[in-house]
Amino acid sequence: MPTTRRSPLGRLLALLVTLLVAVSAGLAAQPAAAATPTRVMLLGDSITGNNGCWRALLWQHLQATGYTDVDFVGTLQNPYCQGAFDGDNEGHGGFLATGIANDNQLPGWLSGTDPDIVLMMLGTNDVWSHLPPATILDAYSTLLAQMRAQNPDVRLVVAQIPPMNPAGCSDCAQGVVNLNAAIPGWAEENSTEASPITVVDQWTGFDTAADTTDGVHPNETTGIQKLEARWYPALAAALDTTDPGTDPGPDPEPGACSVGASVNAWNTGLTASLTITNTGTTAVNGWSLGFTLPAGQSITSGWNAGYSSGGGTVTATNAAWNGTIAPGASVSIGYQAAHTGNAAPPTGFTLNGAACTTA
């Protein structure tokens, strides 16, 4: 058989095809660039630092619900809490918000960590030092300006601080109330579209007798669990906004949940028990139950969940120990509320945004 010879043009085309195949193969072999984790600074005093094992619960809750691309950042390490977690933080025992601001300490902490989100729970030691809310909020403003100087798009999640009743401080309890009452207005005034501020209520439902070791610092059971349960939904929401690609884990499909509610009422108060049942076929890992209170009701305390409310709309978020609901399984939570005559049960239940039937 005679040998077929390619023309010069044919040989050139063959060479180009060979080169294109080689380049394509080389590109395919390149590893995908690793996503940059969202950096989260936990800023506070000893309630965040040495007494802050809620940080471990929060880290573990994030990991269990799909928020794995997160990096807790800070210049301190308090690694003694149970379980694996990222121990980096800025929980400085004994520090005041006013002291951090006046001594210009935050810029140094920020420069080495460059957080995308800051969870700030400061003011306990300022109240203990009998400082007025206006002075503490001025310090908040200084710290916020320093955060934005480091990162103009930083997201701040600020806590209304837990109640406190230390020995020898007769005005501390009211001082916390006064500061917490002023924080939402400060947040609204200073929040921007690029750098929003979210307020987390760490006061409601926290009991200094049952949830602390000394009237101030959270105990290792209910205290840290209650703090974590309030931080988690706010941080998860901030993570979703900062990185819309974050996968928060499986949510129940519409109709995959039912809620039973029972109420025991008296003249001006009531207790309500809610039973959440997963009627779907996959486990729920991490949940937030939304519902609406009847007019005139307001929650004063709760159990087995963290509660946040506004305008009659309530969100109950799982505690560290009851975040998973297997198919067909149930969890029970409850709360105490004041009412002005209408003691009906709540309505409009949703679980992770999916509508639930009423049992």
Image (cartoon, rainbow, N blue to C red):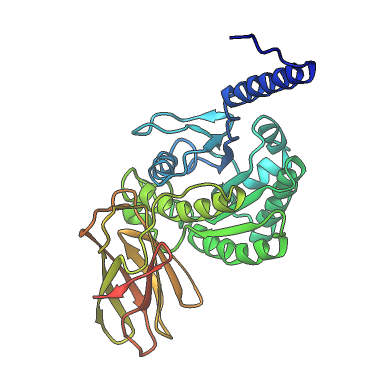
66 sits left or right of 146 in the view? left
Q: Residue at x 52, y 47 (%)?
A: 246
Picture quadrant of residue 178: bottom right
Residue that lies at the very extreme toward the left in this rendered image: 328
Q: Is residue 261 above or below residue 91?
A: below
* Spot occupied by residue 296 in the image (x, y as percentages of width and height): 43, 85
Question: Which quadrant would the C terminus be assigned to in this image?
Answer: bottom left
Picture quadrant of residue 349: bottom left
* Spot occupied by residue 124 in the image (x, y as percentages of width and height): 54, 50
Residue 92 seen: no
Between 93 and 90, the residue placed more toward the observer is: 90
65 sits left or right of 161 in the view? left
Question: Which quadrant would the N terminus be assigned to in this image?
Answer: top right
Q: Residue at x 66, y 42 (%)?
A: 99
Q: Is residue 140 above or below residue 204?
A: above
Q: How many marks?
A: 0
Residue 11 seen: yes
Residue that lies at the very extreme toward the bottom in this rendered image: 341
Q: Residue at x 32, y 85 (%)?
A: 343
